[in-house]
Amino acid sequence: MGKNVTLYPGVYLWGNEIFIGDNVDIGIGTIIHSTNGIHIGNNTVIAGQCYLIDSNHGTKKNQLIRLQQSEAAQNGIVIGNDVWIGAQSSILKGAIIRDHAVIGANSVVNSEIPENAIATGSPAKVKKYRQ
């Protein structure tokens, strides 16, 4: 946990290797669940009711779903410096959000978002770049 980090009410951190940089704000009701690691860079703002998870549940057909192990991303989730993630967004297994990117509200990130990109949607797609 870095310096000057604000965790608003109802933020839930669970799992292994959660790194939070300096000057980070994490909004009300956000859940961060890490199996292999989630890295949040400096000066990043995560709005309320976001969900960050670096694994998916197993889905093999010949085994009860409730008995299957999660399948985690080898490199977890990486969120760069000076990133803004809008309310109710989901950041999923293997996501990489590069420095200075903006993720619009209600977006689902499951891939790489380039530096300075503004991405929205499900799945999140780059709409334009910060000027």
Image (spheres, helix red, strand yellow):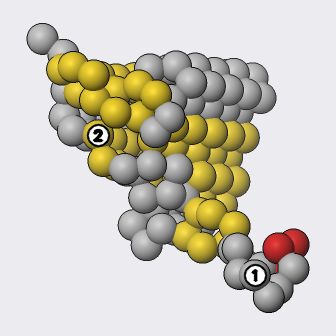
Quadrant occupied by the C terminus: top left
Residue found farthest to the front: 61
**Is residue 59 placed above or below 62 in the rendered structure?**
above
Which residue is at the front of the view, 42 or 34?
34
- Is residue 89 at least partly visible in the picture? yes
| Residue 58 percent coordinates (x, y) | 69, 74
Which of the 4 image quarters holds residue 125? top left
Q: Secondary structure at mark 1?
A: loop
What residue sits right under mark 1 in the picture? 61
Comparing marks 1 and 2, which lies closer to the viewer?
A: 1
- Is residue 46 at least partly visible in the picture? no
What residue sits right under mark 2 in the picture? 113
Answer whether labels 1 and 2 touch (C-beta < 8 Å): no
Q: Secondary structure at mark 2?
A: strand
Please name the residue shown 60% across and 73% down the image: 71
Please name the residue shown 82% across and 73% down the image: 65
Residue found farthest to the bottom: 62
Amino acid type, callout 2 = Ile
| Residue 61 percent coordinates (x, y) | 75, 81
Mark 1 Cα-neighbour bin, 10 Å: few <14, some 14–19, many ≥20: few
Please name the residue shown 69% across and 67% down the image: 57
